[in-house]
Image: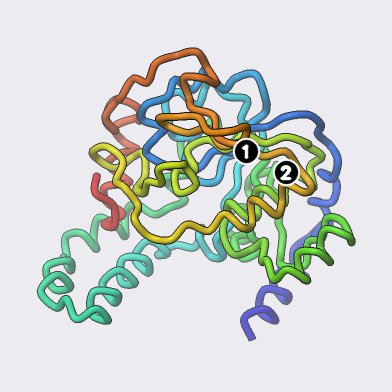
Amino acid sequence: MKYRLYEQIYQNIPDIKKIINLKNLEKGTCFIFGDGKSLKYYNLSSFSNHPSISLGLVSLLNGSKNLKLKYSLQCDSFSAFPGKNIFDYFQNFNSYIKEKKYSNAFNFISPYKLLRMSLNGYSKLLFKDNEILLNSNFITHCTNYYFTKFFDSSFYFNYHLKINENIDKDLSKNLFNVYESSLNFSIYLAIFLGFNKIYLVGCDYHDIEPMVAHWWEKGKPLTYTGKQAHNYIDFMRNYIDIHIITLNKSYGSNFISYKDFSGNDLEYKENREIINKKKLEILKNQGIYKV
């Protein structure tokens, strides 16, 4: 049912094959930026020598003006819909209920928060006064079409976008889903665009010492103690050269510390130092981040 809905929306988008025009448009190396807290330590001018692909809100960083941000991805379905932030808020509330953390759940609910959230949607956060993103190619799921069609450089995909018959056949045979996460899709897209080498930056979950939380949240990175899943990245190395920029140390040829990559020392900055105050306030009003 869900996939039929996506297909119906996609078929109603004018010029639905526009994204095919991006195939093999690029060559060489690119950076793929996640939203990890390691970005609070980096000078983004260290990554200015190759085109960049962002997975989330990197365009809101003050230092993003130093990047060649060519492709901005918003992969989640319905992410641009009005009220999506309120939906996410109640999803968090529901998770407390499922975990039987009832006191946390009812402390989490706040009419004042809900009012602020209703006035500060995700589209306002992403598009208003964001020339970095608006000057990039915006690639998003087809369900976001009706709220992003004003953007001339928008490209829409659904779950039938294919790159190469051999790659897609191997992915299916090995039970990998390129749409399982934004990072999965971004690597797949980089191959589609024609790049042959990737550096992952701010993708902290895949660091040697894995971390969680976002760069716009307060405090330093939090250690992730769960199970990592490197299988997809290892598999995609059959088709594209992938290196991971790490916060603290290098290991082999696939993990390169920021200092070894750039020659620069780490320099920690708190969230309020690296993002416009108005944007930080909108993030705070989403009600789901520790801002």
**Residue 127, how many percent across, how many down?**
50, 42
Q: Is residue 114 left or right of residue 62?
A: left
Along the line of sight, which residue is nearer the eye, 125 or 217?
217
In the picture as drawn, the residue positioned furthest to the right comes out as: 165
Residue beneath disc 2:
190
- Looking at the image, how many numbered discs can be counted on the residues? 2
Image quadrant containing the C terminus: top left
Dividing the picture into quadrants, the one containing residue 62 is: top left
In the picture as drawn, the residue positioned furthest to the front comes out as: 252
User: How many C-alpha atoms fall within 10 Å of the one at disc 1: few (<14), some, or many (≥20)?
Assistant: many
Which residue does the image show at 66% across and 39% down from the upper left? 242
Can you tell which mark lies on residue 53?
Answer: 1
Res 172 seen here: yes
Instruction: Give the vertical position of 238 relative to 279 (above or below).
Output: below
Dot 2 lies on which element?
Answer: helix
**Residue 284, how many percent across, how many down?**
26, 47
Q: Is residue 1 left or right of residue 221?
A: right
Circles 2, 1 touching at the beta carbon (< 8 Å) = yes
